[in-house]
Amino acid sequence: MVELRTRRWNDPAEPGDGFRILVCRYRPRGVARARETWDAWWKELGPSPALHAAAYGKRGPPIDFAEYRRRFIAEMAVDPGRFYLKQHERRPRRSRSLENRRSRARSSW
C-alpha cells in the first residue's frame, strides 16, 4: 500500500516527501517553473472545469462546500478510473533533477 499525504501546493519540500503531485484544475499563476514545489501536475485528478467554475461563481453565485463535495463525489463515481493512482505510475520529469530544481528554488527565497 502506498502512503498518501496531503500538503498545500506552496508548502516547501521536505526530506521524505516522496513524489509530490499537484492536484488542481489550473496551475497556480505567477509560480515560475524553477520554484515549483511539486514533481508533477495532474489536473485530471481535480474537479471538472464546470465544477471549478461553479465553486468560484463564474456563471452565477458560488456553490457552498457541501454542494461542491456532493458534485465532486458524483464526478468521481462516473469516471473512477480517472482518480486511480497506480503505485508505480510516474509522469516523466523535466530534464533538470528534482533536487537541483528544489535547491535553486530555496536559494531564491
Image: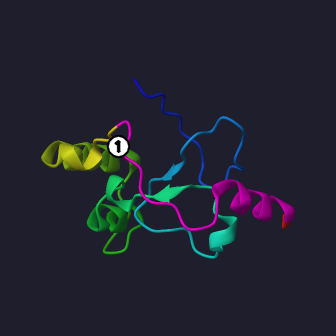
Q: Amino acid at mark 1?
A: Ala
Instruction: Please determine whether, in this image, residue 66 is positioned above or below residue 63.
Output: above
Q: How is the image coloured?
A: rainbow
The 10 Å Cα crowd at callout 1, few under 14, some 14 to 19, many 20 or more, is few
Instruction: Please determine whether, in this image, residue 33 is positioned above or below residue 19.
Output: below
Q: Is residue 80 visible?
A: yes
State which quarter of the image contains the N terminus. Answer: top left
What is the quadrant of residue 52 in the picture? bottom left
What is the quadrant of residue 108 in the picture? bottom right
Q: Residue at x 35, y 57 (%)?
A: 63
Q: Nearer the viewer, residue 49 or 80?
A: 80
| Horizontal relation, residue 72 to residue 5: left or right | left
Furthest residue in direction top, as rendered: 1
| Horizontal relation, residue 65 to residue 37: left or right | left
Q: Nearer the viewer, residue 40 or 79?
A: 40
Q: Residue at x 37, y 36 (%)?
A: 87
Q: Which residue is mark 1?
A: 66
Q: Residue at x 32, y 72 (%)?
A: 60
Q: How many marks?
A: 1
Furthest residue in direction left, as rendered: 78
Q: Position of residue 7 (x, y in %)?
A: 59, 43
Span colored in magenta: 87-107
Label 1 residue SS: helix
Q: Is residue 31 visible?
A: no
State which quarter of the image contains the C terminus. Answer: bottom right
| Horizontal relation, residue 62 to residue 104: left or right | left
Is 72 magenta? The answer is no
Q: Position of residue 9 (x, y in %)?
A: 59, 54
What is the quadrant of residue 49 in the picture? bottom left
